[in-house]
Image (spheres, helix red, strand yellow):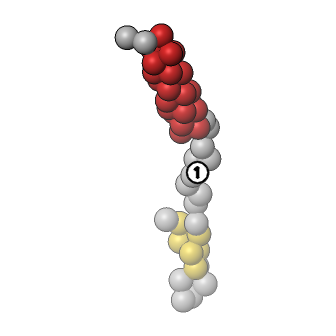
Amino acid sequence: MDTHLLIGVAVMLGLIGIAASRDLLRNLRAQPQLVPIRVERRDAAGYTRRR
């Protein structure tokens, strides 16, 4: 094979690897987690009920 072709293939594979690793790192970065909170509801008589 031609040396230039091998170098070109190696560069392309390297760029694909860099793009894939950046995408994986972006997905693995800490994402905000939802935290459950307690909600108190009042019924018609004004009494508090916990859920």
Q: Where is residue 11 in the image (x, y as percent from the top left)?
A: 53, 21
Quadrant in the picture for the N terminus: top left
Please name whichever residue, 31 or 21, is drawn nearer the observer in this view of the structure.
21
**Hey, which quadrant is residue 48 in on the image?**
bottom right
Which residue is outermost to the left?
A: 1
Q: Position of residue 32 (x, y in %)?
A: 62, 47
Residue 48 appearing in the image:
yes
Q: Residue at x 57, y 52 (%)?
A: 34
Q: How many marks?
A: 1
Q: Position of residue 41 (x, y in %)?
A: 56, 75
Answer few, some or many: residues within 10 Å of disc 1's Cα (few below 14, many 20 plus, some between 14 and 19).
few
> Which amino acid lies under the numbered mark 1 shown in the image of this protein?
Val
Residue 15, relative to residue 26: is it above or below? above
Residue 28 appearing in the image:
no
Please name whichever residue, 47 or 36, is drawn nearer the observer in this view of the structure.
36
Q: Where is residue 3 in the image (x, y as percent from the top left)?
A: 48, 10
| In the displayed structure image, the side of residue 31 where residue 2 appears, left or right | left
Please name whichever residue, 19 or 36, is drawn nearer the observer in this view of the structure.
19
User: Which secondary structure lies at badge 1?
Assistant: loop
Please name whichever residue, 11 or 18, is drawn nearer the observer in this view of the structure.
11
Which residue is outermost to the front?
A: 2
Q: Which residue is drawn at 50% across and 21% down?
A: 8
Which residue is the site of mark 1?
A: 35
Q: Residue at x 60, y 43 (%)?
A: 31
Residue 15, relative to residue 38: is it above or below? above
Q: Which residue is drawn at 58% across and 37% down?
A: 26
Residue 2, relative to residue 12: is it above or below? above
